[in-house]
Image: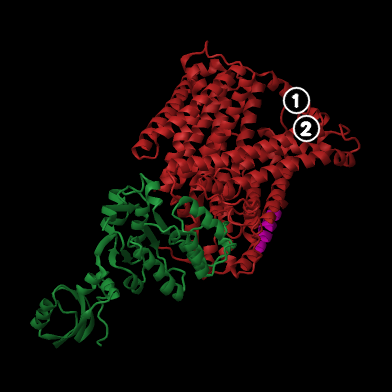
Chain colours: A green, B red
Amino acid sequence: MGQIVDVNDLSRSFGGKIALDGVSFRATAGQVYGLVGANGAGKTTLLKHLLGLLRAATGSVRVFGLDPVRDPVGVLSRIGYLSEERELPEWMRIDELMAYTRAFHPTWDASYARELIETFGLDPSKKVKELSKGMRAQAGLVAVCAHRPELLILDEPSSGLDAVVRRDILDAIVRTVVDDGRTVIFSSHLLEEVERMSDHVTMLHGGRVTLSGALDDVRHSYQRSRVRFVQHFDQPPVLESALAMEGGGRTWSVVHSGSLEQFHHSVLALGGEVVESRDATLEEIFLARAGRSRQPVEAA
Amino acid sequence: MNLRSPSVAMLWELWRVTRAEIAWKLALPVGAGLTALALAATFGPAGNPKAYEDVNDLAAALALILIVIPHWPGWMSMAWLTGGQPGFSLRLSYTRPVRTAWLVGLPMAYLTAVSAGIYLVSAMVLRMASGYAFPLLPVAGWMAALTVVFIAAAWSTRNMAIQVVVGIVAIVRALGLSINRLTAVELPDTFDWPPRLWPTLFDWPRTDYVWIALIGLVAFAVTVAGVTRQRRGDALVTRFWTLGGGLWDRLVGLFGLPCPTSSATRAQLWFDLKSRGVPVLTIGVVLASVIVLVSAVSGPIDAAWNADPNVACPIQECFWVRSFPPMVTPIMLVTILFLGVNAFGIRRKQGRTYVSAFEATNAHGTAQLAVLKILAQSVCVLAAFSAIGVGVWISMPLLGDGLFIQMWGVPLNSRRSVITNAFAALTGYEQLALTIVAAAGVVMAVAAFAVFGALRARYSRRASVASVLLVLYGLAFVWLAVAVRMDPATAARLHLDVVYGVMRWLATAAMVITIVYVVWNGFAEHVLTIRYASGAVAISAAFGAAWLTVLHITGVQLAGMSAMNAIWTVSPALLPLTVSVLAPWSYSRIRHT
């Protein structure tokens, strides 16, 4: 599979705040990459570097083997980008928006654009300023998808879209892109969506990549186990490879990584037993990695 | 930071928003006023006490005007909060648990007090420096009243037409009041309000303060009522003039030109012309038509208003419609230039300046994109200027000569033939050179504003400081140039001619260093290409040839000049090269931040 994106040791700060800190990220053709992270984790900053909207302070960014700042034409002509703010010229009509975008992309597929416009129920004669937030997102989505870009970058694509559009149409668009052997990179804070759509997931926290890999591998390498101890614990007991613990007293729910066998041994050593184990969901992994579920809660 | 109450938090917010404007409103006028006073004191004809006093009086009057003028445009930093959209500037505060009267009253009081305070500090500094009795409270009071009226007009309604009308009425009324009071007694051989009379002339009646208080109260009440309606969402939303909607939007949609899809360059040109260029051109054509129409009807109106349409009564006592077209033409040209300054389409919202990702992510080279934007905008500004020029040209026979000979001692209409003859006397090449220089001047002005806008968006503080320094440098430069020319002996005695020479070298060297740095940096970053740079050099060479021809037409001979003078005279030829390398470089700063 061809390498589409190659980000190496990328760092960037704004004023005194570090937005990206030594981030490395790679994307190959025909895959969907989901970027997850809390607000301010650096997702949009990373995407803007791929588009050349931000210069790399240190490290390097290559898209299709090119530097997007030095060769914007070579990179941007092969990319479709939907920004989080859905910035479109207010004065343009939807048909003008399509014509304008078409001029930049010889690969424009007019019938696909028409099909998407009809699917979304957009009126081509309407001006952008007359559209609701969701309709703007839909119009933007048509404009970035209809030239069948080799790389589709979507920044919080679900923002403003209703559940039906999000689940059926967005998923279908992304699948179409990937089935054609092209690549999608999208950021989202909806973990269920990332889990549903992505082949790969990259988790950012405080400007650093805390987790990156194929979604199935990630899920298999994290488990959520319910453990019961003979002894009563006021504070979470120290268990090997545990990332987050919830509960209290004798019963605790633990998100952990690494070998299940080692975890069993660790629990046994404290006089406990593993009642049940399953693969952790992405949300559980995210919360564990982001360090937000350390507070003891009422025992289940 | 511990902001102990909503009021303290609001005041802190207002301070953060306005502090830069406060700084320049204080620094620039005081600096310019002090310069005027210092130059008059230094270069005034010391041998003639009466003339010396007159020159210094004039400089003091100019300094007074200089510290008043910056308050007239109102508070720009507040207007920028909403990107120039009319209505209450602090609309993000609607969700705060603060009553509307307080939400409006506190900022209003702050801005009014700061306006009056800036004037008072400026006047006191000039007082201490010069010894002249610069008026304090009377002018500060009316300044506060004017500020409060401007704020009320800007905040109480979202209808720009009402705002413009109220602003014009307030300024005309304030001007009328000032002129009426300051020129009540006509003095022989000098202007009517010399500084020695200021204590008397500015000793305005106590009732003024009652009027000022009343204006403040009414303005406050009107603003609270207007903002209350806006806050609950039922205000009339008539966006007449904003760049996002209203009139501008109507102008954008006026011509239904279809977007060409055959090439990216054509589509981009369509985008820039439609979104920014054509509205400017349309406004230019409308203004030109207004000039022609007013000129056409001015004769009959003047005849109806006055017994004799020509010179039947003194200028001050008659109302002449014919005087308006030539007087408003410069304002129209400045307006067109002002509307055309944002060639790069930089947006401003809530203190953030940025270029839209939609435009920045188009598959275009940065240099190509920057040049396209500047050319599209320049062509439209140039066309608008031409339309106004043609309008004035057509109107001149309709206006006649009589009134203008009486007003300015200039037979305006008869000058047409002088201009025509002078232009006809030139060779074809000279006419072409003159046209090139004029057109390039407009393009360079548009490009310079675009470059400054981009650098200000990217390096806000540094660009602001640099621009203030440049303005101060320019002021000092102009004053030195005037001083050296008017009184070379005194200038030589104070070594000002040396300072002036050094400043000229510095300006030329700065231009050359800027070109070298930007070209080097532009090539390193792949913003500039050999092809682009060659084009820029070729255009600059063409301009240089045209510039030399224009110098020749105006009788400037380089042969007998000193090296410095010759280089300085030819140096404008470098301007096209400077802006043509700066434009893509500065655009790349905002496209790739």
Q: CA distance from mark 1 to mark 2?
A: 9 Å
Q: Secondary structure at mark 1?
A: helix
Can residue B38 be seen?
yes
The answer to if A69 sits in the magenta stretch is: no
Q: Which residue is at 38% across, 37% downward?
A: B522
User: Residue B190: x, y in percent?
Assistant: 72, 28
Compared across the picture, whether B482 is left or right of A172 comes to right
Give B43 or B475, whichever is nearer the viewer.
Answer: B475
Task: Tell whether label 2 touches label 1 (CB within 8 Å).
Answer: yes
Instruction: Give the residue pinned by disc 2.
Output: B396
Q: Which residues are magenta?
A: B210-222
Compared across the picture, whether B291 is left or right of B586 comes to right
Q: Amino acid at mark 1?
A: Arg
Examine the rendered structure and indicate whether residue B349 appears above or below residue B65: below
Callout 1 crowding tier (Cα within 10 Å): few <14, some 14–19, many ≥20: few
Picture disc at residue A52 = none
**What secondary structure is the magenta-colored segment mainly?**
helix
Compared across the picture, whether A129 is left or right of B583 comes to right
The answer to if B217 sits in the magenta stretch is: yes
Can residue B81 be seen?
no
Give B85 or A153, whichever is nearer the viewer.
Answer: A153
Examine the rendered structure and indicate whether residue B170 appears above or below residue B508: below
Instruction: Give the residue pinned by disc 1.
Output: B415
